[in-house]
Every structure is written in structure tokens, then in C-alpha cells.
Amino acid sequence: MLGGRIRALREERGLSVRRLAAAASVSPALVSQVERGINDPSLDSLRRLAEALDVPLFDLFAEPREEHDLTVVRAADRIEVGTPGDVRYTRLSSGSGVLEVLEGVLEPGGRSSSEPWSHPAEECAVVTSGRLLVEVAGRRATLEAGDSCSFDSRRPHRYLNDGDERAVFVLSVTPPSW
Amino acid sequence: MLGGRIRALREERGLSVRRLAAAASVSPALVSQVERGINDPSLDSLRRLAEALDVPLFDLFAEPREEHDLTVVRAADRIEVGTPGDVRYTRLSSGSGVLEVLEGVLEPGGRSSSEPWSHPAEECAVVTSGRLLVEVAGRRATLEAGDSCSFDSRRPHRYLNDGDERAVFVLSVTPPSW
DNA sequence: GCGAGTGTTCAATCAGGCTGAACGATTCGT
DNA sequence: ACGAATCGTTCAGCCTGATTGAACACTCGC
């Protein structure tokens, strides 16, 4: 799992076990053992390996990404996802992976929820048409078509439509939270 | 750095050092030491802590998120970012964090690059207007306004405009790759 | 005052990460 | 066909350093 990741990175670079070991100042045996999951390396060794492989440490722990090549979602056949509050969300992304992109539609007077929500993610909203009122941690901002905003989703937030026409926006979230 | 992350997660959950230690079946001393960066825990201990904190292991190594509350980017004053090939990109997101959202504009006959690019990320493009030809790992798809596509950015890919009008699209990428 | 909680420090221990050496399989050049 | 040089792997054993339990100083209610 973690070993497989290291092996993949090493082979990607065409390095032999010994070469990598030398670059990381560890023994070849260690590299072999770690890659095969026989031994849990120390953090120190991992740091050296990560440096030798020229990747940030946390990359070694990254979940294996979902394998999808190219997913196309036609405007006509989008899938509707959960409807928190008054917002109608349809999915623009594939639904797998760590990136979720949705289209949100909010009718005049509507709101995403009565109480602001909070979840561990990062999001960015781009207004396509209409006017959107964003509330984040008590602060408010009004977005017109073409405007965008981004924030840490852990801060309590919600969307409102205080205008008199339908608001449409593209919402990007990572990682997905529902 | 790693310790700080653990401490933050623990405090977020209102757990005391002892409570977390108990939940992770390690000693309180260890938690304290690790949080203060006094020593490197073993991977096994880290796994237990991650489980007790209910986060994936690699979260403990995640870069500390940039602290921004609410960043608004007005349509009028977007910042232009690098221009790979013929695509003009302007930034819609804040520019910090792991989520990057851009608006791309591609004139007729233009292309993002002559050779397909590859970078370790995930991306999703939503066509706002015009027609966009997407090429991923040799496969091609034509997107009209409202259509979208998503794929693993590690697969070689590029965008082309084979239509006769300007193509505008919203591009979400995580993590940012330039 | 006491008791229960907080986070922290430190000596001592013992698990386990790491190494060096030897292994069998390959792939060279000759 | 044969060393020579690589490849990745295995294993016993050393020795570091992660882990622990106990004691620390502190703040809060009662």
C-alpha cells in the first residue's frame, strides 16, 4: 500500500533498488523490505526516500487515485445530487476522485440552508448568471455573474439568493463532502 | 509541522491528550511528545492516532491549509496566470490552498499546447460558451456549452478549439500544478 | 483545603528498524 | 559457455530510538 507507492515512484524514474537506496542514504535491503511491506520504515527513512524520489512526503501516503480516463457529462443528462435547502445541484464532474464540480441553481428568495454548514474541504463558487449572496463565518459578499469566491469549507457557510432572478453557479469542492 | 497538525485535529475535536492517547492505545506522553515535535513516532503509532482522530493517515502530512476566510474575485479584476499555448487563463479561486479554479479562453484554431501535457492532479472542465475539443490519452471528445468532462491529469491531455467561435470554459484543478 | 482535570518531563526499557553479507536470477560482453 | 556485473531478495543480529510509567507543575470546581 505504502510500499507499492514507493515502488511505483521508483520504477517511474527508472531507478534500481540500490540506486535509490544510495540516493537516500539507506541500505538496499531497507528499500526492498519497505516496498514489499515487510517492514514499517521510520519517518526519518521515509523522509529521505521522499527526498530522493523528489516528492513531498505526504505523496507517499496518497490514496491510489480512482482510475478513470475521460468522463464526459452532457448538459442534457446530468445527474441530480442531493438538494440541501433550496439549491438544486447537478454533477458536472465524474463523481469519482477527489474533485467534485457541481452546478447549483438557486431560485429567488432561496437559501442553501437555514443554518450555515461546515465540512472539511475547500470550495470555490463561480456565478454564471443572476446574483448570489455568500455568507462565510458571518461575513457576506454579493457576487454578480462572472464573480467568484473561495474559502475553507470548515468555516460555517451558506448561499442565499436575495435577488429577483434565478442564480446559477458552478461549485468546485475538494474533497467531496456528501 | 506534523505534530502541529495532530494537535490541531485533536483540539478541533475537543479531545484531551489523555483521551486521544486512550483512543489510540498509546501513552499520553507519546502524544505530548509527538505534538511538540520532540520525537518521531513510528508509523504504527501514527496509524493509530490517525484512526483515533478519524482521518486518513496521509491527512497528517497534508500541508497546513492556507488561512483565508473569504476571498472574492470580481469579474473585472481577475489575475491572469501563465498562458500555456494559446489558452488565456484567469484565476477565479484565491490562489492559496489545494483547489484551483480558472477561466480559460481559447480562440478558434487555438490549442493549449502542441504536445499533450501530464501532471499529477485531477481536473474538470465546464464549457461556458463555444465549443471545446478535449484530447485525453489519445481519446477525443467535443464539448458544447453546458457540457463538462473530468479526468486524471496524469494522462496526457490538451484542449483545442476546432470551432469558429471563441471557447470559454471553467477549469477546476486539484492540486494546482503551476 | 482537596480532587480531578489539564499538559509536560525524564529515566529506563525493549521492541523493531536497519544493516551487512550472502542468496538465486538475469543480462551483459567476450 | 563462461565470468562479471547487475538485478531484487532474505536473514540474523545489533543498536538506536520510540514508547512507557511515574512524577511534575498547573488550573479549575467544590
Image (cartoon, coloured by chain):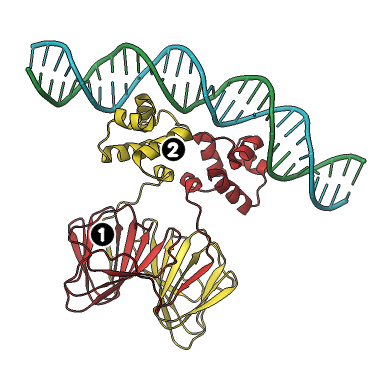
Chain colours: A yellow, B red, C green, D cyan
Residue A87 visible in the current orientation: yes
The correct choice, above or below, for D7 with respect to B46 in the image is above
- What chain does badge 1 belong to? A
The residue beneath circle 1 is A70
**Image point (61%, 54%), residue name:** B12
Identity, as a three-letter code, of the amino acid under mark 2: Arg
Neighbour class for label 1 at 10 Å: few (<14), some, many (≥20)?
many
On-image quarter of the C terminus of chain B: bottom left
The answer to which image quadrant residue B121 occupies is: bottom left
Q: Are marks 2 and 1 in contact (CB under 8 Å)?
A: no
- Out of A48 and A82, give the one closest to the viewer: A48
Disc 2: CA contacts within 10 A as few (<14), some (14-19) or many (>=20): some
Between B53 and B120, the residue placed more toward the observer is B120
Provide the chain ID for the residue under circle 2: A
As rendered, which of B123 and A52 lies closer to the eye?
Answer: A52
Going by the numbered disc 1, the residue's amino acid type is Leu
Q: Is residue A148 left or right of residue B23?
A: left
Residue hosting label 2: A47
| Mark with earlier residue (2, 1) | 2
Q: Residue furthest bottom?
A: A164
| SS class, disc 1 | strand
Could you tell me residue A41's position as x and y percent? 44, 31
Looking at the rendered structure, the secondary structure element under dot 2 is helix
Q: Give the residue drawn at x 40%, y 42%.
A: A60
Residue B144 appears at what percent x and percent y? Answer: 24, 74
Relative to A48, does residue A103 appear above or below in the rendering? below
Tell me if B165 is positioned left or right of A61 in this view.
left
**Distance of mark 2 from mark 1, alpha carbons?**
34 Å
